[in-house]
Image (cartoon, coloured by chain):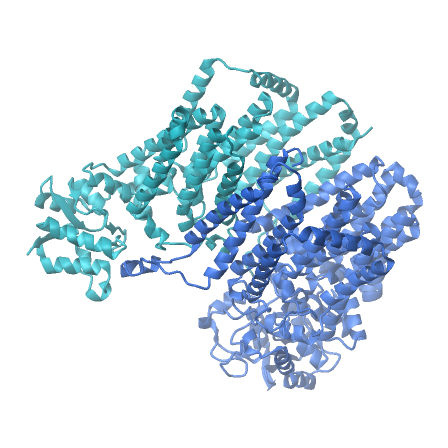
C-alpha cells in the first residue's frame, strides 16, 4: 500500500536532487559564453540571461525524477529498513543542497556587494568550495552504504554515557587553540595601517589615550595585540563560565563561537573590528568577571545573592553616570530606532525590538514560575535578562546595523539555558546530536562570514590584501619632527598640553603624558584640515581650560593649522574658546613639524 | 500546547497578555509623545560644533515605561488570578477577549507601521491609528462581555449558514461587492491621469498603436509591429469600436469591464470547485490584491494594459471547459478547452502557448495514467485534441491577416521580439531583487515556482495511485499553466512583477486551503474561513494602491488629484510628468516646439480636483491645427511618417495610417518640453529596416515636431537618443520644410 508519507519523502528527495542538478547546470553554463543572435543594440545595459533555460531545466528535472522515483523507489519504501536508510540519505542530500544554494547566495553577494565598503574581500574560495561540495555530493551517493555504516558507528559513539576524562581535556585544548588561531593577528601593522587609512585612529585613540594617560607608551600594534588577547581571554572565560553554569561542554562551545560571530563579525564592524574596539563585546568585557562572581555567590553564599546583585546594580548605575553615558541618553549622537525601517532594513529593525521583547518575555515567565523549589536555579537567567536590558540601551541610542550583535552575550546565555531546559527530557543521543548540529552550524557560519574571511589571522591573512594601508602606516613619519619639538621643550615627567591632529601618536613618540583628563581631546583628519575638538560639552571645555590654568604650563603645543583658522571660521565654537584662551595667555615661541610651541606670557 | 501543564499554559497566557498591553503602552506613548518634541538638558551644554549631534528623543523614556508596564501588568495579572492559576477556567473565560486584544493590537501596529514607512503621506494611517486607539480602550472596557458576544455571533453565523435567504444574499453579495470594488466611474479621469502621468507610454505600445493601425486597415506584424500578439488587438479594438468608437476612454472602459467580467467568471468557477463562499471570497480578494495592487503597477494597474487580466482574459473560458470535462467526462468540453487554448495563442502568443502546453500535459497525463485513461474513456483517435489548439490559432490568424499567414515576412516579424527576448533584450536577472536588498521579493520570486512544482509532484503521484479525487486535476492543470505564465517574471525579474501572473498560484493556494480546512473538525471550519476572508479583506483595504484606486468606495471625492490618497513616487515626488521632471536642465534646448521656454510640467497639487484634470486633458490632447496640417497634405489611404510625441493620438485625430513598422516610434513626452524623445528603434537592424522603407516608398511628406529642426544639440543627445538623431538627420537630408502646424512641421521630399 502506497502511503502519503512515502510520497512526501520521495517528493523531498526529488526537489533536493533537482536543486542540486540545477546548481551544477548553472555553474557549468557560467563558463559557456553567450552567442550573439542579433545586431548591436543602441542602448546599453542589455544583459543576456539564461534564467528561462534554468527554469525549464528545474521543472523538467523535477518531473522526470518524480516519474523515475514513482517507478523505481516508491514501492521499496514499504520496507522499514529501506525507509530508515532513505531518511538518512535525505538528510545527507539536504546538507549538500543547503551548501550549494549557500554558495550561490555568497556568489551573488560577492559579485554585487551589499555594502560597498569592502574592497578587500574576494570570493576565490567559493569556486573550489563549490566543486568540493559537488564532488562530496556525488561521492556520498556512490558510497552511501559506507556512510550509513559510519553513521551507525557515530551513533553508538554519541550514546556513550560518560567519556574518558582525556576527551574533555582534548576538547578544551582544541577549543583554546582554535580560538587563538582564529583571533590572533600575526601582523598587527595590517590592522594599524587599516585604522589609519579608515578613520585616522580616531576610534582606537580612545583606548591608546588611556594607556598614554597612565604613562604606558605602547604602539598601536601592541594595543591591537592586547585587544586580541583580551578577546581570547573573554571568549575562553565565557566558554568555562557556560561550562560551570550549564554543565555542558557543547553548550559552552556553541555560546563561545556564537559570541565571536555576533560580537566581532557583523557588518557594522567592517572592515576589521579592531578599528573601533568599542563595538565589540569588550566594551562590556568586565561582565565575565561579574558572571563568574555571581555564579560563585549563588553557589557558595545563596542567601547573600540578592544583596550582592543590588550592590552591583548600584555600582553600575553610578559608573554609567561617571562615564558620561547619560549624555547619550539625553540625546547626544542619537539615531532614531525606526531608522532601519525607513531604509527597508527589516531584519535589523525587527531585531532591535525582538531582543528586548525576548528578555522581557523571559523575565515575565520566570517571574511567574519562580517558587521556593526553583528560586535558586532561576536567579542567573533573571540577572542575565536584566543585565541584557540594561546594556541594550546602548543599541537603542545607536541602532547601527548589526550592532546589537555585540550586546547579545546575555541573550546567548539565555538561549543556551532554554536549550538545556528544552532538551532536558530528551534522550542522550538526541541531545548530543542537536548539540553537534549546533556546533557545526555556528562554526560554518563563523568560518564563512565575509568579515572573518578578511580578518588577518594566521589562516585568512593575505600578504597583499592590506599592502597599501601597511605602506601608508610604515611611511607615516609626518609627526616625527613635531614629537621631537615636544621632547626638546619638556621634561620626561612633565604633563604636556597638546592640541593637534594625531595627538596620541605624537605623545606616543614623544614619550610624554597628556595633561587633559578627557584625552584625546582632538579628532584627527588625514586631509590638510587640522581636525577638530572632540569635547562635546561646555563643561568639558571649561575643565580643559581650567586644567591649563591650574598646571600653569610653560609650553603649549598646537597644530599650526589650528592657529591659522580665522575667528569667522571658529565662530563661537568650543575650539574657538580654547584657542582664544591660548592667544590671550601664550605667545609663539618656536615651531617644528606641524606644531607650534606657545610660551606662557 | 495542550501537553503543557495547566499552570504553565495559564502563565504563558498571562505573560503574553502583559506583553500585549505593554506593546499597546508603547504604541500609545510613542504616538502621544510624537506630538511633543523632546528637549534635552544638554541643549545649553553642548558646544556649537557638536549641536548637530544633539537629537533628543523620547525612546529611552518609552523603553523604560514599556519595561515597567510589562512588569506591572504581569504582577497585577498574577495577583488577580492567583487563585485560578492552576485551573482551566482562567483560559476558558478570557480566551475570546485575548483573541480580540491580539487582533486589535495587530491592526494598531499595522497602522503604526504605515505611519513610519510612509511618513510623507501619513494622514490615513494616522486617522486609522486614532480610531483603533479608541477601539483598544473599548475592548478593555467591555472585557467581560467578549465571551458572550462571541457566542451570539457564532449562533448568528450558524443561522446564516443554513438559512436559504442569507445564502442567496451571500451568493450574490460577493460578486456585487467585486463589481463595487473594481468598477471605475470616472474613466475619463483615469485616462487624463495617464496622459499627464506617463504620456500614454505603456498603453500606446500595448494596444493603442497596433489597435489604431488594425482598424485603419493595416496588417498586424506585417505593416506594424504588435509585440504581444494579434488577437488581443482585434478583440479589444473591436469591442472599443462597439462601445462607441476607438478612443483612449473606450479602450480603458473595455479593459476595466473585461477585468471585472474575468474576476466574476473565476468567482463562479471557484464556487464550483472550492465550494465555500467565504473561502472563495478570501481567494478572490487575495487574487485581486496581488494581481491588481502590487508595487509593480504603480500607481494604477490599467496604466499598464499588459499587466491587467486582459492579458489572459480567455483562460477563464479554458478552465471552465476543463472543469466541465473533469465533472462530466464529456469530450466536447475537452475540444472546447483546446479551442480556447488555440484562441489564446492567437490572442497573446506567449500566454496561449503556456495554456496549450498545460492542455497537452493534461491530455498526455490522462493518456499515460491507466486509471484515468479508463475513467475518461480516452481513445487513440482523441489524439486530434493535441493539434486542435494549433489548428484553431492558425484558422483565427488566417481570418485576421489573410494570405500573409504563409509569408516569411510575417513569421520573421513574429519571431523578432521572441528572438530579442531569448537573446537577452530587456531581461533582468532573477537575483536583481536580492541585490536591491529586497529579500522578501527575492524569496517570493524563487519560492513561487517551487509551490507549483511541489503541488504537481504531489498531485500527479496521488492521482497516479488513485489516492485523489478527479477534481484535483484542476489544480494540476493550473500548476502547469502557472509554471508557464511565470516566464513573465523569469524574463523580467523586476521587483514584484511576479504578481502580474500570480492568479494560478492564488487558485492553487485556495485548493490547498480547502484541503487543510476539510481536515479540521466541522465546527472549526467556518471560523477558519472567516478569518481567512477577513485577513484577505484587511490586506486589500489597507493597501495604499487600493486606497488610491478611483472606485466608488474611494475615501476622496477626487481620488486622482487628492494627495490624501493619490500616490506620489516612492521618493515623495509627484507622479504627474514623473518621467521627465528630473531631466537635466543643462541638457535642455533653449526653446520648445512653440518657441517658448515654459514646459508646464504640472503636478497633482496644481489641479483643484479631478474635473480640472479632465478639463486640462481635453484642452491639451486636442491637436487640431496639427491634424488639419496632416489631413491637408496627405490622402486618407496614405501611410503618414510622423515623428512626434502622442503620434497615435495625432494619427487618430487625423484619421491616417502610420508609416512606421516600429510604431509608436517615440516614447511620448509633454509637447512643450525642451528636449527630444527616446525612440523605440532599439537595434541597427531595425534602423536599417526603417530607412529602407523610406528609400523604397519615398513618402512625399514627413511630419515631425518643430523642435527637431534645431541645428545644434548637446553632445549628450547623441548618447541619450542614439536612434532618433540618425533618423532625424536622414529626414532633414532628404526633406525640406514646407508648412507648419502648432507643434508640427511638414517636410517635403527633395527631388
Please state the horizontal and vertical placement of residue A299, each as a whole percent of the image.
41, 25
Residue lying farthest to the top in this orientation: A164
Q: Quadrant of the C terminus of chain A?
A: bottom left
Task: Tell me: residue A476, above or below residue B310.
Answer: above
Which of the chains is blue?
B
Residue at image point 93% right, 45% down: B381
Residue at image point 23% right, 63% down: A570
Q: Is residue A468 at all visible to an observer of this figure?
A: no
In-front residue for pair B392/A553: A553
Residue at image point 75% right, 56% down: B281
A59 sits left or right of A158 in the view: right
Please state the horizontal and vertical placement of residue A320, each as a whole percent of the image.
32, 44
Q: Quadrant of the N terminus of chain A?
A: top right
A9 sits left or right of B601 in the view: right
Residue lying farthest to the front in this orientation: B83
In-front residue for pair B616/B609: B609
Which quarter of the picture shows residue B374? top right
In-front residue for pair A67/B101: B101
Circle count: 0
In-front residue for pair B254/A176: A176
Residue lying farthest to the left in this orientation: A601
Please state the horizontal and vertical placement of residue B283, each as a whole percent of the image.
74, 54
Which quarter of the picture shows residue A532? bottom left
Please state the horizontal and vertical placement of residue A470, each as a whole percent of the image.
30, 40
A200 sits left or right of A297 in the view: left
Q: Is residue B553 at all visible to an observer of this figure?
A: yes
> Which colour is chain A painted?
cyan
Amino acid at each position: 500500500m502506497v502511503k502519503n508519507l512515502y510520497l512526501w519523502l520521495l517528493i523531498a528527495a526529488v526537489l533536493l536532487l533537482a536543486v542540486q542538478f540545477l546548481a551544477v547546470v548553472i555553474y557549468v553554463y557560467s563558463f559557456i559564453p553567450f552567442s550573439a543572435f542579433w545586431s548591436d543594440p543602441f542602448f546599453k545595459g542589455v544583459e543576456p540571461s539564461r534564467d528561462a533555460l534554468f527554469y525549464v531545466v528545474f521543472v523538467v528535472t523535477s518531473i522526470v525524477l518524480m516519474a523515475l522515483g514513482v517507478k523505481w523507489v516508491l514501492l521499496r519504501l514499504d520496507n522499514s529498513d529501506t525507509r530508515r536508510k532513505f531518511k538518512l540519505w535525505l538528510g545527507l542530500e539536504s546538507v549538500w543542497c543547503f551548501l550549494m544554494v549557500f554558495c550561490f547566495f555568497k556568489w551573488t553577494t560577492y559579485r554585487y556587494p551589499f555594502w560597498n565598503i569592502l574592497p578587500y574581500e574576494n570570493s576565490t574560495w567559493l569556486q573550489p568550495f563549490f566543486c568540493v561540495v559537488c564532488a562530496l555530493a556525488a561521492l556520498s551517493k556512490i558510497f552511501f552504504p559506507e556512510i550509513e555504516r559510519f553513521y551507525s558507528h557515530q551513533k553508538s559513539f554519541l550514546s556513550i554515557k560518560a567519556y574518558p576524562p582525556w576527551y574533555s581535556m582534548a576538547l578544551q585544548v582544541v577549543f583554546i587553540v582554535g580560538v587563538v588561531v582564529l583571533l590572533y593577528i600575526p601582523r598587527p601593522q595590517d590592522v594599524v595601517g587599516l585604522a589609519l587609512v579608515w578613520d585616522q585612529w580616531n576610534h582606537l585613540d580612545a583606548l591608546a589615550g588611556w594607556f598614554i594617560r597612565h604613562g604606558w607608551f605602547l604602539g598601536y600594534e601592541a594595543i591591537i595585540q592586547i585587544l586580541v588577547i583580551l578577546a581570547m581571554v573573554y571568549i575562553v572565560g565565557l566558554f568555562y563560565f557556560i561550562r560551570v553554569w550549564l554543565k555542558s561542554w557543547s553548550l559552552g562551545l556553541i555560546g563561545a563561537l556564537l559570541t565571536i560571530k555576533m560580537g566581532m563579525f557583523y557588518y557594522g564592524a567592517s572592515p576589521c573590528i579592531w578599528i573601533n574596539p568599542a563595538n565589540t563585546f569588550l566594551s562590556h568585557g568586565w561582565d565575565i568577571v561579574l558572571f563568574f562572581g555571581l555564579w560563585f555567590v549563588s553557589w557558595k553564599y545563596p542567601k547573600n545573592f540578592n544583596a550582592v546583585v543590588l550592590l552591583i546594580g548600584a555600582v553600575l548605575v553610578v559608573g554609567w553616570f561617571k562615564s558620561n553615558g547619560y549624555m547619550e541618553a539625553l540625546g547626544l549622537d542619537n539615531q532614531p530606532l525606526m531608522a532601519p525601517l525607513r531604509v527597508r532594513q527589516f531584519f535589523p529593525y525587527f531585531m532591535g525590538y525582538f531582543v528586548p521583547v525576548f528578555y522581557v518575555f523571559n523575565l515575565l515567565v520566570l517571574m511567574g514560575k519562580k517558587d521556593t523549589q526553583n528560586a535558586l536555579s532561576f536567579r542567573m537567567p533573571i540577572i542575565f535578562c536584566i543585565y541584557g536590558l540594561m546594556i541594550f540601551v546602548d543599541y537603542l541610542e545607536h541602532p547601527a546595523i548589526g550592532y546589537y550583535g555585540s550586546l547579545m552575550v546575555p541573550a546567548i546565555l539565555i538561549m543556551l539555558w532554554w536549550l538545556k531546559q528544552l532538551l532536558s527530557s530528551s534522550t542522550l543521543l538526541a541531545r548530543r546530536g542537536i548539540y553537534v548540529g549546533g556546533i557545526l552550524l555556528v562554526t560554518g557560519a563563523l568560518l564563512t562570514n565575509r568579515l572573518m574571511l578578511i580578518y588577518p589571522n594566521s589562516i585568512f591573512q593575505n600578504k597583499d590584501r592590506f599592502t597599501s594601508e601597511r605602506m601608508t602606516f610604515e611611511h607615516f613619519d609626518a609627526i616625527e619632527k613635531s614629537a621631537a619639538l615636544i621632547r626638546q621643550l619638556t621634561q620626561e615627567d612633565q604633563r604636556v598640553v597638546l592640541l593637534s591632529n594625531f595627538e596620541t601618536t605624537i605623545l606616543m613618540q614623544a614619550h610624554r603624558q597628556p595633561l587633559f583628563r578627557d584625552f584625546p581631546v582632538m579628532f584627527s583628519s588625514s586631509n590638510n584640515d587640522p581636525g577638530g575638538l572632540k569635547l562635546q560639552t561646555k563643561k568639558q571645555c571649561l575643565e580643559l581650560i581650567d586644567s591649563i590654568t591650574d598646571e600653569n604650563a610653560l609650553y603649549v603645543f598646537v597644530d599650526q593649522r589650528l592657529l591659522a583658522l580665522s575667528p569667522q571660521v571658529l565662530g563661537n565654537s568650543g575650539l574657538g574658546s580654547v584657542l582664544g584662551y591660548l592667544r590671550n595667555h601664550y605667545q609663539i615661541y618656536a615651531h617644528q613639524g606641524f606644531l607650534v610651541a606657545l610660551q606662557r606670557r | 500546547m495542550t501537553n503543557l501543564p495547566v499552570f504553565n499554559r495559564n502563565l504563558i497566557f498571562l505573560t503574553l497578555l502583559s506583553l500585549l498591553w505593554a506593546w499597546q503602552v508603547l504604541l500609545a506613548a510613542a504616538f502621544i509623545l510624537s506630538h511633543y518634541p523632546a528637549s534635552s538638558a544638554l541643549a545649553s551644554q553642548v558646544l556649537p560644533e557638536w549641536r548637530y549631534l544633539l537629537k533628543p528623543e523620547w525612546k529611552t523614556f518609552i523603553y523604560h515605561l514599556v519595561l515597567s508596564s510589562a512588569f506591572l501588568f504581569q504582577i497585577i495579572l498574577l495577583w488577580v488570578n492567583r487563585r485560578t492559576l492552576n485551573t482551566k477556567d482562567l483560559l476558558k473565560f478570557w480566551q475570546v477577549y485575548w483573541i480580540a486584544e491580539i487582533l486589535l493590537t495587530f491592526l494598531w501596529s499595522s497602522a503604526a507601521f504605515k505611519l513610519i514607512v510612509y511618513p510623507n503621506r501619513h494622514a490615513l494611517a494616522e486617522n486609522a491609528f486614532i480610531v483603533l486607539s479608541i477601539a483598544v480602550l473599548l475592548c478593555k472596557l467591555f472585557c467581560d462581555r467578549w465571551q458572550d458576544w462571541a457566542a451570539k455571533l457564532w449562533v448568528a453565523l450558524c443561522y446564516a449558514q443554513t438559512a436559504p435567504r442569507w445564502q442567496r444574499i451571500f451568493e450574490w453579495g460577493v460578486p456585487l461587492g467585486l463589481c463595487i470594488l473594481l468598477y471605475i466611474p470616472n474613466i475619463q479621469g483615469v485616462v487624463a491621469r495617464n496622459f499627464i502621468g506617463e504620456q500614454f507610454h505603456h498603453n500606446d505600445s500595448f494596444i493603442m498603436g497596433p489597435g489604431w493601425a488594425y482598424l485603419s486597415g493595416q496588417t498586424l506584424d506585417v505593416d506594424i509591429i504588435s509585440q504581444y500578439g494579434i488577437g488581443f488587438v482585434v478583440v479589444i479594438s473591436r469591442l472599443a469600436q462597439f462601445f462607441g468608437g476607438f478612443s483612449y476612454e473606450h479602450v480603458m472602459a473595455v479593459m476595466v469591464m473585461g477585468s471585472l467580467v474575468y474576476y466574476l467568471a473565476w468567482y463562479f468557477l471557484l464556487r464550483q470547485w472550492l465550494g465555500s463562499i467565504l473561502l472563495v471570497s478570501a481567494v478572490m480578494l487575495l487574487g485581486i490584491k496581488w494581481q491588481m495592487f502590487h508595487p509593480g503597477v504603480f500607481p494604477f494597474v490599467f496604466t499598464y494594459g499588459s499587466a491587467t487580466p486582459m492579458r489572459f482574459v480567455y483562460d477563464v473560458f479554458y478552465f471552465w471547459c476543463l472543469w466541465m470535462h473533469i465533472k462530466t467526462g464529456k469530450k466536447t468540453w475537452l475540444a472546447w478547452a483546446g479551442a480556447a487554448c488555440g484562441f489564446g495563442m492567437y490572442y497573446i502568443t506567449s500566454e496561449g502557448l503556456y495554456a496549450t502546453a498545460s492542455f497537452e500535459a493534461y491530455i498526455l497525463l490522462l493518456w499515460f495514467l491507466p486509471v484515468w485513461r479508463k475513467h475518461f474513456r480516452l481513445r487513440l483517435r482523441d489524439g486530434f485534441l493535441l493539434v486542435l489548439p494549433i489548428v484553431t490559432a492558425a484558422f483565427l490568424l488566417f481570418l485576421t491577416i489573410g494570405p500573409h499567414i504563409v509569408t516569411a515576412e510575417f513569421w520573421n516579424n513574429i519571431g523578432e521580439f521572441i528572438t530579442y527576448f531569448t537573446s537577452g533584450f530587456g531581461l533582468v536577472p532573477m537575483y536583481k531583487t536580492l541585490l536591491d536588498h529586497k529579500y522578501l521579493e527575492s524569496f517570493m520570486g524563487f519560492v513561487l515556482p517551487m509551490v507549483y512544482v511541489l503541488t504537481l509532484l504531489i498531485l500527479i503521484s496521488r492521482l497516479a495511485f488513485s489516492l485523489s479525487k478527479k477534481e484535483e486535476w484542476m489544480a494540476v492543470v493550473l500548476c502547469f499553466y502557472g509554471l508557464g505564465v511565470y516566464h513573465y517574471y523569469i524574463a523580467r525579474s523586476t521587483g514584484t512583477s511576479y504578481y502580474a501572473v500570480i492568479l494560478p498560484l492564488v487558485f492553487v493556494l485556495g485548493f490547498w486551503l480547502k484541503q487543510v480546512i476539510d481536515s479540521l473538525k466541522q465546527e472549526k471550519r467556518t471560523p477558519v474561513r472567516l478569518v481567512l476572508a477577513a485577513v484577505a479583506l484587511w490586506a486589500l483595504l489597507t493597501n495604499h494602491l487600493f486606497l488610491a484606486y478611483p472606485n466608488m468606495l474611494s475615501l476622496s471625492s477626487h481620488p486622482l488629484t487628492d494627495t490624501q490618497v493619490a500616490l506620489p513616487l516612492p521618493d515623495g515626488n509627484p507622479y504627474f510628468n514623473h518621467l521627465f521632471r528630473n531631466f537635466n536642465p543643462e541638457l535642455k534646448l533653449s526653446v520648445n516646439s512653440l518657441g517658448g521656454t515654459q514646459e508646464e510640467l504640472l503636478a497633482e497639487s496644481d489641479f483643484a480636483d479631478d474635473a480640472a484634470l479632465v478639463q486640462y486633458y481635453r484642452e491639451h490632447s486636442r491637436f487640431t491645427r496639427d491634424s488639419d496640417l496632416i489631413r491637408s497634405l496627405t490622402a486618407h489611404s496614405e501611410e503618414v511618417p510622423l515623428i512626434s510625441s502622442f503620434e497615435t493620438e495625432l494619427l487618430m485625430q487625423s484619421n491616417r495610417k502610420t508609416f512606421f513598422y516600429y510604431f509608436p516610434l517615440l516614447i511620448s513626452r509633454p509637447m512643450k518640453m525642451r528636449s527630444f524623445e527616446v525612440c523605440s528603434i532599439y537595434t541597427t537592424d531595425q534602423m536599417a529596416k526603417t530607412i529602407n522603407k523610406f528609400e523604397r516608398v519615398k513618402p512625399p511628406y514627413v511630419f515631425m515636431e518643430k523642435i527637431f529642426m534645431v541645428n545644434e544639440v548637446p553632445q549628450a543627445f547623441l548618447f541619450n537618443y542614439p536612434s532618433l538623431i540618425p533618423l532625424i538627420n536622414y529626414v532633414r537630408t532628404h526633406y525640406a520644410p514646407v508648412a507648419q502646424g502648432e507643434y508640427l512641421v511638414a517636410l517635403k521630399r527633395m527631388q
